[in-house]
Amino acid sequence: MTQNNAPNDNVVVRFAPSPTGFLHIGGARTALFNWLYAKAKGGKFVLRIEDTDRERNSAEAVEAILDGLRWLELNWDGDPVSQYNRADRHRQVADELLATGNAYRCYLTQPELAAMREAAEEEKRSFRVVSPWRDRDPSEAPEDAPFVIRLRAPKEGQTIIKDHVQGEVTYANKDLDDLIILRSDGSPTYNLAVVVDDHDMGVTHVIRGVDHLTNAARQTQIYQLMGWQVPRWAHVPLIHGSDGAKLSKRHGALRAEAYRELGYLPVAMRNYLVRLGWSHGDDEVFSTDQLVEWFEIDAINKAPARFDIQKLEAINAHWIRNSDDDELFRRIEALLPYIPEGQRILKAFAAGAADKLRAFIPAMKERSKTLLDFLEGAKFLWAEHPLVYDDKAAKLLDGPTRELLGKLALNLQELPDWAAEPLEAEIRDFAETEGLKLGKIAQPLRAALTGTTVSPSIFDVMAVLGKDETLERLKQATAT
């Protein structure tokens, strides 16, 4: 049994997460590959929530997944589809398979299945269910006995998966047992539900993790027995940590949204995630428009990808440097509700710090790998009085230095044009008059105005703080 590939026009792809937790970084990449392929082919990207496990699913998990996709800006077409709400349709297809003889009622009991499993272990062979009810008359079953519905899968020949990533993968039909498609309580199983939903939603290409490759063989059999078009398959490699082991918590954040809280930009995450398994020559940095233009599933690599936080930081730093100032400010503002200091900063924004930060963005771009770096470097803008000095800054502000800064403050009071260039000229003249190198003035000045010894150009700092705030902080520093 060989799959019959779907035509290449009218592409429809889907992302189908189970709402048992957050949007995993691997799931985010799968969603991205699907979204990009839909965009590249002018097709549709649909979303299905596979919420049939009612005990493990939650509304909070659904919202977390949707929130993660929205943050990554992977917008889907139409409303999300609930798999649970389609259970009647799944049962209808199971009945059709029964009616055509392509499925059967299986009355095997749990003790009988346990005995089969035990015999396989004793004989050191893989366990495979061979149900006597495949060819047995259902009338021989005990009255009112519970049953499942199994697929009457072909026993001869092969099921061949022609995969865009894994190549041609062959399964001997004798090794694939008769899949349960309807449980004894009437609930559909995963493989049946997925096939029915993908068929009804018009899915032409299934792009998902390589851990579903065996499912592709089982699902192909259902498609064939229903006489439906088999979608094209693309089973993408797993993501490993930088050490080559399966990605886990010890490698860093696993939630896609956690990277928002760490100050990463959506464009950087899309750029980095697509490189975990896909390539375009030796290019490392891509705009989203370029990705849409160039993306092809045939270019997805077969080998597992390695997650490298340093590469992600480098790409994020690139996009921070190359972002429009207003766009970057919007991203910073959108981040604030998700970080511990966010509410305090928002209050400072309302009191005027927003304009200061907006003006300070050009000075901070080259210094920041993440938006958290950005906020850390700019926190002096909304620092409360009296300013708190870190240890290094406090050591700089000794008696002679405070006296020197006091003299500088008197000069600055008379400066008519409060901007970076005239401030630099004034302070250089002051240093020369005092017989000092510029650093001997600039560094304690930085300590007095920011509370730290690290910042962008001190002249930019002074210009953004403004004359009144600069002189007030110098007054505080010289009075201690």
Image (cartoon, helix red, strand yellow):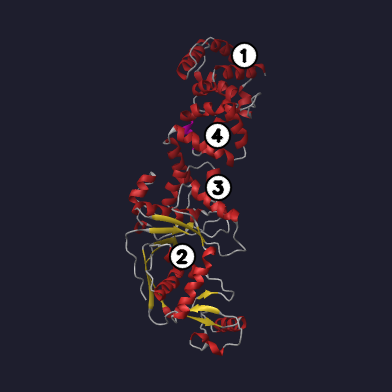
User: Which x, y percent locates residue 260?
Assistant: 53, 44
Q: Which residue is mark 1?
A: 403
> In the image, what residue type sits under mark 1?
Glu
Q: Is residue 135 visible?
A: yes
Q: Earlier in the sequence, mark 3 or mark 1?
A: 3
Q: Earlier in the sequence, mark 4 or mark 1?
A: 4
Q: Which residue is mark 4?
A: 375
Report how far apart the C-alphas of labels 2 and 4 lie in the structure: 45 Å
| Residue at point 57%, 13% (across, down) | 409
Q: Cβ–Cβ below 8 Å for labels 1 and 2?
A: no
Report how far apart the C-alphas of labels 3 and 4 lie in the structure: 17 Å
Q: Earlier in the sequence, mark 2 or mark 4?
A: 2
Report how far apart the C-alphas of labels 2 and 3 lie in the structure: 31 Å
Q: Earlier in the sequence, mark 3 or mark 4?
A: 3
Q: Earlier in the sequence, mark 1 or mark 2?
A: 2
Report how far apart the C-alphas of labels 1 and 2 lie in the structure: 77 Å
Q: Which residue is mark 2?
A: 197
> In the image, what residue type sits under mark 4?
Leu
Magenta part of the protein: which range? Answer: 364-368
Report how far apart the C-alphas of labels 4 and 1 lie in the structure: 31 Å
Q: Cβ–Cβ below 8 Å for labels 3 and 4?
A: no
Is the residue 125 above or below the residue 232 in the image?
below
The answer to whether 341 appears left or right of 271 in the picture is: right
195 part of magenta stretch: no
Q: Cβ–Cβ below 8 Å for labels 2 and 4?
A: no
Residue 227 vs residue 335, the one in the foreground: 227
Give the quadrant of residue 168: bottom left
Spot the residue most to the right: 480
Q: Which residue is mark 3?
A: 258
Task: Identify the disc placed on residue 189.
Answer: none
> In the image, what residue type sits under mark 2?
Asp
